[in-house]
Image (cartoon, rainbow, N blue to C red):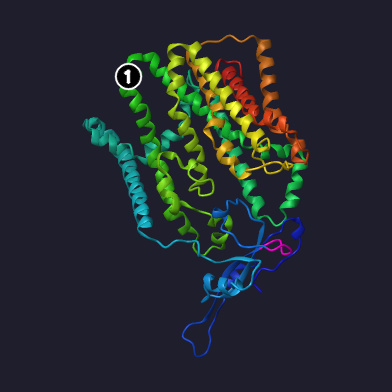
Amino acid sequence: DSSGRVGPAVLRGHIYFAGHYSQCASVGVPIEGRTRPFRAAYFMYTYFCIYRKPQRCVNLVEEGIDFVPAYSIGRCLPASCTSEELANVFRPAAVIPNPVCGVLKTDDTIPSRGAGFYITVSIMAAIAVVCIVAGIVDFFFNEKAEKRGITQYLSWRLFMAFSLYSNVASIFDVSAAAKSGQIGPIHCIRFFSFCWVVMGHFFMNYMSIAVNPVDISEMSKDILSEFIMTGYFAVDSFFFISGLLLTFLWLKSYKKNPGRTNSILSWIMFYVHRILRLTPAYYMAVFFYTFVYKQLFVGFPMNINMLFSLDYCRSVRQTQRAFENRSINKLLQCLAVSWYLASETQMFLFTPLLLLPLALKPIVGVCIAVLAIVASTAVNIALVYHYHWPTSPIVLFAPDPEMTNFGDYNMLMYFSPVTRCQIYIMGMLVGWLLQTQKRLRINWLVNIVGWVVASSLMLAVTLGLHNQTNGYAIPLFWRAMYSSLSRLAWGLGLAWIIVSSYYGYGG
């Protein structure tokens, strides 16, 4: 009764028939003459959808396949069975072709708790204990420590750096946002972009487990659904902010002390500081995801869902050095969301080539920035023309019969710093403007026109592909134009929002 069965709406995309996990797991029947009861376990079988053509099971990574049209059915079977035994039963070598592609038992994808698990948990627990103790000492004894002069010692300052009390208070303190010289709109852009990313990923993952995804796709007929389809512009906002803040703060330091900021030691620390700032948090995230995260799902049927089980951290964690994981293998991604950090870090490596000219010879710096943007745009156009790729990474588009290598789209286009650097460089130019022009007069008419143009550009790139979403095949030339120029349009909109607001014309 708890096994899944092929139900209605297969033609509407229903491909996941789970059954009833908890009912299956509760089976425990005592049998006379046996010392242990008969128990059941939950399994999941994966089948190919297409039976009429000969199919064979493939290794997704070896074959370079991102997605295989298959459906899954939950089965309640004796707990003493293993997935390997059942795979041999349902996939005998003599039966070819065979629609059964794989068998998984609950917790098959959960690794055993080895040294990595205990080391990671110990480190995290130690940090938590130090933070709590430091916070208690900070809250109750900081004033006494100040009176006795203890707060001047390096050991005390290092200990207080872990204070949970001070750190939480600092994180939630927004008073500095109202101070003069703050780039206020960045906080708003960052918040809405964060929400936009979460919403986009939610819909993307929900479509893969919904029982009627074809019906969900009917949402695309509503033009407002484009805000979900084009959520990738939120990522461009983060690239823009990164370039802006880097340039704004570096030029601020350069104006105060040009000799020290441009010294060899300062440039060495320019990179060392980034490594020290990001590496501990990044690797703790990787270690937690690799050794601890899956242990939280022991006994949950979710752990045999493809969204959960496709994880390569244990096999590729040695390649995660220097945040360069994007260049390893497009299908062997550990902590896949870290592609952003990898891409942004590679842009960061080359920023001195633009920072120095902007500080010493601004005209030269602007020319270099324009040339880099033009080169990035040209590469984007060339890739679309060469592979006949779509306008963007959205799922719903009319495929070009001449399109090739779409499996490489993310690595060569979406993740690539070569094509992503357009808007990062635009952010750097805005950061240079804000730091060098402390005051800027904007005529009221120019301000209104600027807001209208900025809004129009941003709405055009987010809503402009609605016909494509509904099946219209956009010609190759216009696909290349949108792919290469849409981020520039988005960047111009962001630039106006920040510039106008920073100088007091944004309301």
Q: Residue at x 28, y 39 (%)?
A: 159
Up the image or down, 330 lies above or below 167; here it is below
Q: Residues within 10 Å of mark 1 (few under 14, many from 20)?
A: few
Q: Whole-percent x and y of residue 176?
A: 46, 25
* Left or right of 492 in this view: 287: left
The residue wearing badge 1 is 263
Magenta region includes residue 52:
yes
Dominant SS type (magenta) = loop
- Does residue 494 appear left or right of residue 460 in this picture? left
| Residue 348: % across, % down | 45, 29
Magenta-colored stretch includes residue 430: no
* Residues shaded magenta: 48-54
The answer to which quarter of the image holds residue 384 is: top right
Residue 181, horizontal then vertical, whole percent? 48, 18
In depth, the one of 320 and 201 nearer the eye is 320
At 49% across and 33% down in the image, what residue appears? 344
- Figure quadrant of the C terminus: top right
Q: Quadrant of the N terminus?
A: bottom right
**Quarter of the figure with residue 270:** top left
- Amino acid on which the number 1 mark rests in the picture: Ser
Residue 146 locus on image (x, y percent): 26, 31
Q: How many marks?
A: 1
Residue at coordinates 39% horizontally, 18% vertically from top-left?
Answer: 253
Confirm whether residue 17 shows in the render: no
Q: Is residue 52 visible?
A: yes
